[in-house]
């Protein structure tokens, strides 16, 4: 009875306790129960036994009133007739079975010295408080004691250790404190010891190791510390050992290998560290092994399933390395497996077998590679499969549609390619599907609409295209839908409005166009709406005014116009969430108020376009040549994009492999190629460290930047976001951005690996009189264009925009043909990710935008400012700051400077060709716009890059661009004068 109580009460509790986080084999507790007390409870009605009756009746009188009424059968002189009491052949009380009677009170009133024939005492699951009296030691014939699930406090009396006859001792789920008395080691017949769920502290006494008959030792959920005594190896009868949820530390002793009969071993949630001893492989009969939440390292035990009975295996959240244990391949008994949050490597295609009983498998956040195999289809009972954040490649096999019980499928943050198989539509139980952050292509299959239980769908950061299927509107249980950072086109399907419980909708960073459908306003539970970075146009439906659940919106970077809906989330939106639209109005700071006639002010840019059109139509022949140029640009862009996508496969992937997973080999090769970073391979020095040239094999030359600050110490914790960032950076491809290959971290050295560029930095080229002459006007104009293109790409086409933060002439590198390549994109964030005050660490004096003096949040407009400085530097041949500061300090009021006089005199500006002159003027004009003190007045890099490509100075006629003429003050009416004027403003500002 005592034991069946244990089953019925403890197991559900354990399940509840572990349910959300961990895996627990509830079956493992059944063993506790098996040894039920089988002694008959039929009392032999023998002679009256007044003494024992009195002892019980006295105790009854000390109990709470309600408890006394529960024991109404307790009266008279024959205790053998009392409820829950059984006597032996001699009429003496042998069994007290008082479990779950709702008794309240203490044990103090029970005179154990008068109950010396009791062999079994079960008082479990009552409300007994106070301490366990030391006199309990008088029960000298006791072999079964169960006081679990009461409110007992104080220490465990050492006198319990004197009942040598005891075979089962359960004191679990009380509030017992203090150490485990070493005297328990005297209980040489003990087979079951259950002290879990108390507040016991101190180390596990090594005397426990003397309990050579012990089969179950449950000490979980206490405050035990110290390490596992090596003497534990003597407990070779042990079948179940649960030390989980304590503060036990140290390595696991090799003697544990002697416990070959173990079927349950739970060491989870402690502070164990070090590698598992090799002897661990001798434990092969396990059905349950829990090692999660420790600091264990080294390899997992390869023979863990050799005995063929492993069902529950968790080792998550440790630092295990090496392969998946080989014995798992044929471990068909497996039900739950959690290896997530380690650094396991190897190919999962081979390591995993067929698990027909498996229910839950989580391999996330490791470094596993390989492909998803057909074998998974045999996991017919699988409800959860997570393999996110690894390096799994290949396609999602269509047979995944056969895992009929699947409720959760998370394959996010891998390298999966191919399309989403339409067969996934068969997974009718699916609740969560996360395929985000892969390279999945194609359309979203309309069959997704069949998933009527689907609550969370995340397909963000892939290469999905086509239109968003309206069938998603049939997913009536959808709570969150994230399709951001893909290439979805056309309009937002109005059917999305049918997913009425939707709370989060993120469609940001796509190519969605047309109007926002008014049907979205049906989403009355919607809290978060992000449709930023698309090409949505028209006005926002006024029905949005009814979306009162909205707490966060982001509609920035679209072509929206008209009034904002009158609802809290819009009224209180930060400017960043509505910026970069065509003509929104409303009460938000930074927006113009809506005027009642609804007429819109044409913005500056529209004005500029009108000017272009006027000029072009005036000069008919020019129209023709301009269109031609634009077409060529568009064509080139297209070709470049296509080329980019083609390139992605082969060579770069190999690099990622080399860097990510064979780091040691690559490290050695770099060290070898630079002869240990010998000075003869030195090429330069930048903000982040010294750069070396490393020729690894023929034609494979890299720039290796050895960083000044190595990332020691804090590193392990943020390794995952760090690696993700590296992966993101190494995926960037643009002809004007230096290719970043990766990062090697080593105890002594830490370096970044980049594409190698022959001519070094823009600054060194400009500083060298010889080379600067070779670096003619056409090349310089091309460099400015290239830098503008690179920034425009990172700001506009990378989504969300990637900000450089530290653009200087020193990190713009030139290749053999003087084509510009921007380097160090993202380096600031990579090396000091959580630095809040980035200006001191990332910006370079002379290039940082003035607003960063009072704000530490960098925006794209900070890069625009730095670009302005670099553009001037390129045409002036030196940093404009030198010049300006001298001028500023000498005279309070600035004098008019002619552009011709400040251009790089080494290139004889007077001999500038007509076309180059136009471009130089345009660059100067744009540079000054970029240098405006108010960041909002600066153009975007997209605008700059476009204007530089059109190649016609926008607001002045062609005849005005000879530089001689420019210095003529009569030309005030032309745009050239503006350039002058702004230059003055710039100089004054600098003071
Ligand atoms: C698993 O079983 C297959 C077929 O019986 C066998 O070829 C393979 O070697 C086994 N793998 C391991 C690791 O025991
Ligand atoms: C909206 O999405 C963009 C791009 O995915 C992201 O940068 C931005 O932070 C999001 N906005 C909000 C308010 O979360």
Image: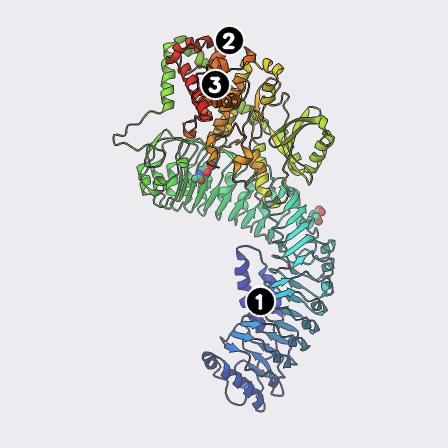
- As drawn, which residue projects farthest toward the left? 597
Quarter of the picture containing the N terminus is bottom right
Whether 216 is drawn above or below 330: the answer is below
Q: Position of residue 128 (x, y in %)?
A: 52, 75
How far apart marks 2 and 1 lie (CA) works out to 90 Å
Give yes or no for contact between labels 2 and 3 (Cβ–Cβ under 8 Å): no
First reached walking from the N terminus: tag 1 or tag 3: 1
Q: Which residue is mark 1?
A: 198
- Give 312 or 44, whichever is nearer the viewer: 312
Q: Which residue is mark 2?
A: 910
Whether 553 is drawn above or below 330: the answer is above
How far apart marks 1 and 3 lie (CA) works out to 75 Å
- Quadrant containing ligand 2: top left
Please indicate, yes or no, whether residue 871 appears anywhere in the rendered image. no
Tell me if 280 is positioned left or right of 858 in this view.
right
First reached walking from the N terminus: tag 2 or tag 3: 2
Between marks 2 and 1 in the image, the one whose residue lies nearer the viewer: 2
Instruction: Determine crowd level at label 2: few under 14, some 14-19, many 20+ residues with C-alpha closer than 10 A.
Output: some
Q: Which type of secondary structure does the marked residue at label 3 adopt?
A: helix
- Residue 738 found in image quarter: top right
Q: Position of residue 968 (x, y in %)?
A: 42, 9
Q: Which type of secondary structure does the marked residue at label 2 adopt?
A: helix
Going 52% across and 35% down the picture, which residue do you hit? 839
Q: Which residue is mark 3?
A: 923
Tell me if 399 is positioned left or right of 351 in this view.
left
């Amino acid at each position: 009875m005592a034991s069946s109580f244990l089953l019925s009460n403890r197991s559900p509790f354990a399940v509840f306790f572990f349910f959300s986080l961990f895996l627990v084999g509830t079956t493992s507790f059944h063993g506790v129960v098996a040894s039920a007390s089988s002694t008959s409870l039929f009392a032999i009605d023998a002679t009256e036994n007044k003494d024992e009756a009195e002892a019980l009746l006295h105790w009854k009188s000390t109990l709470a009133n309600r408890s006394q009424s529960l024991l109404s059968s307790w009266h008279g002189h024959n205790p053998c007739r009392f409820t829950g009491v059984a006597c032996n052949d001699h009429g003496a009380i042998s069994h007290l079975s008082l479990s779950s009677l709702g008794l309240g009170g203490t044990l103090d009133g029970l005179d154990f010295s008068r109950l010396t024939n009791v062999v079994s005492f079960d008082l479990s699951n009552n409300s007994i408080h106070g301490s366990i009296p030391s006199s309990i030691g008088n029960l000298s014939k006791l072999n079964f004691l169960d006081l679990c699930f009461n409110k007992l406090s104080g220490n465990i009396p050492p006198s319990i250790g004197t009942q040598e006859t005891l075979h089962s001792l359960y004191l679990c789920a009380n509030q017992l404190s203090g150490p485990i008395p070493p005297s328990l080691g005297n209980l040489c017949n003990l087979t079951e010891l259950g002290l879990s769920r108390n507040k016991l502290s101190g180390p596990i006494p090594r005397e426990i190791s003397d309990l050579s008959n012990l089969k179950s030792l449950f000490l979980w959920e206490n405050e035990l510390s110290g390490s596992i005594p090596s003497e534990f190896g003597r407990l070779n009868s042990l079948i179940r050992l649960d030390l989980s949820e304590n503060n036990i530390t140290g390595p696991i002793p090799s003697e544990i290998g002697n416990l070959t009969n173990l079927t349950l071993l739970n060491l989870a949630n402690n502070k164990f560290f070090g590698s598992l001893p090799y002897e661990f492989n001798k434990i092969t009969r396990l059905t349950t092994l829990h090692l999660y939440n420790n600091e264990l390292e080294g390899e997992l035990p390869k023979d863990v399933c050799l005995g063929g009975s492993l069902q529950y295996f968790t080792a998550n959240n440790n630092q295990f390395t090496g392969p998946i244990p080989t014995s798992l391949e044929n471990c068909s008994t497996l039900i739950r497996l959690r290896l997530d949050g380690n650094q396991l490597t190897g190919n999962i295609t081979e390591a995993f077998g067929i698990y027909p009983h498996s229910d839950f498998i989580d391999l996330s956040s490791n470094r596993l590679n390989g492909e998803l195999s057909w074998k998974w289809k045999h996991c017919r009972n699988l409800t959860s499969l997570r393999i996110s954040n690894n390096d799994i490649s290949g396609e999602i096999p269509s047979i995944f549609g056969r895992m009929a019980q699947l409720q959760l499928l998370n394959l996010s943050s891998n390298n999966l390619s191919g399309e989403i198989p339409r067969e996934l539509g068969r997974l009718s139980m699916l609740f969560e599907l996360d395929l985000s952050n892969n390279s999945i292509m194609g359309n979203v299959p309309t069959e997704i609409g069949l998933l009527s239980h689907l609550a969370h769908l995340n397909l963000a950061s892939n290469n999905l295209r086509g239109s968003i299927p309206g069938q998603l509107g049939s997913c009536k249980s959808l709570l969150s839908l994230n399709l951001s950072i893909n290439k979805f086109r056309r309009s937002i399907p109005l059917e999305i409005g049918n997913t009425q419980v939707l709370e989060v909708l993120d469609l940001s960073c796509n190519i969605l166009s047309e109007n926002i459908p008014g049907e979205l306003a049906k989403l009355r539970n919607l809290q978060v709406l992000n449709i930023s970075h698309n090409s949505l146009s028209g006005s926002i439906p006024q029905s949005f005014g009814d979306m009162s659940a909205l707490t966060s919106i982001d509609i920035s970077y679209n072509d929206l116009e008209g009034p904002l809906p009158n609802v809290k989330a819009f009224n209180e939106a930060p400017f960043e969430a509505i910026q970069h639209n065509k003509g929104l109005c409303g009460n938000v700071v930074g927006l113009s108020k809506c005027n009642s006639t609804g007429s819109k002010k044409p913005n500056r840019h529209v004005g500029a376009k009108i000017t272009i059109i006027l000029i072009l139509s005036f000069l008919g022949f020019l129209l023709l040549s301009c269109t031609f140029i634009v077409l060529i640009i568009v064509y080139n862009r297209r070709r470049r994009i296509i080329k980019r996508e083609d390139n992605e496969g082969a060579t770069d992937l190999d690099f990622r492999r080399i860097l990510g997973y064979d780091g040691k080999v690559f490290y050695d090769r770099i060290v070898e190629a630079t002869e240990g970073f010998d000075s003869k391979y030195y090429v330069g020095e930048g903000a982040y460290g010294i750069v070396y040239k490393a020729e690894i094999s023929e034609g494979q030359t890299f720039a290796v930047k050895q960083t000044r600050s190595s990332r020691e110490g804090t590193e392990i914790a943020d390794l995952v976001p760090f690696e993700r960032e590296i992966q993101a950076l190494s995926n960037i491809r643009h002809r004007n951005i230096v290719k970043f290959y990766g990062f090697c971290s080593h105890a002594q050295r830490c370096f970044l690996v980049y594409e190698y560029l022959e001519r070094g930095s823009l600054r060194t080229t400009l500083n060298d009189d010889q080379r600067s002459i070779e670096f003619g006007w056409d090349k310089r104009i091309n460099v400015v264009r290239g830098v503008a293109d690179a920034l425009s790409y990172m700001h506009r086409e990378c989504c969300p925009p990637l900000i450089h933060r530290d653009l200087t002439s020193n990190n713009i590198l030139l290749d053999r043909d003087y084509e510009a390549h921007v380097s160090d994109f993202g380096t600031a964030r990579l090396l000091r990710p959580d630095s809040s005050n980035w200006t001191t660490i990332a910006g370079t004096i002379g290039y940082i935008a003035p607003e960063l003096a009072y704000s530490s949040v960098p925006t794209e407009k900070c890069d625009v400012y730095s670009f302005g400085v670099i553009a001037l530097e390129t045409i002036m041949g030196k940093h404009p700051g030198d010049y300006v500061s001298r001028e500023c300090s000498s005279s309070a009021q600035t004098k008019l400077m002619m552009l011709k006089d400040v251009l790089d005199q080494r290139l004889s500006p007077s001999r500038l060709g007509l076309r180059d002159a136009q471009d130089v003027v345009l660059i100067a004009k744009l540079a000054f716009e970029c240098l405006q003190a108010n960041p909002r007045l600066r153009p975007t890099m997209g605008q700059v890059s476009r204007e530089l490509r059109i190649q016609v100075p926008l607001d002045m006629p062609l005849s005005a661009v000879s530089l001689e003429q420019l210095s003529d003050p009569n030309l005030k009416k032309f745009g050239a004068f503006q350039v002058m004027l702004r230059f003055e403003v710039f100089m004054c500002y600098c003071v």
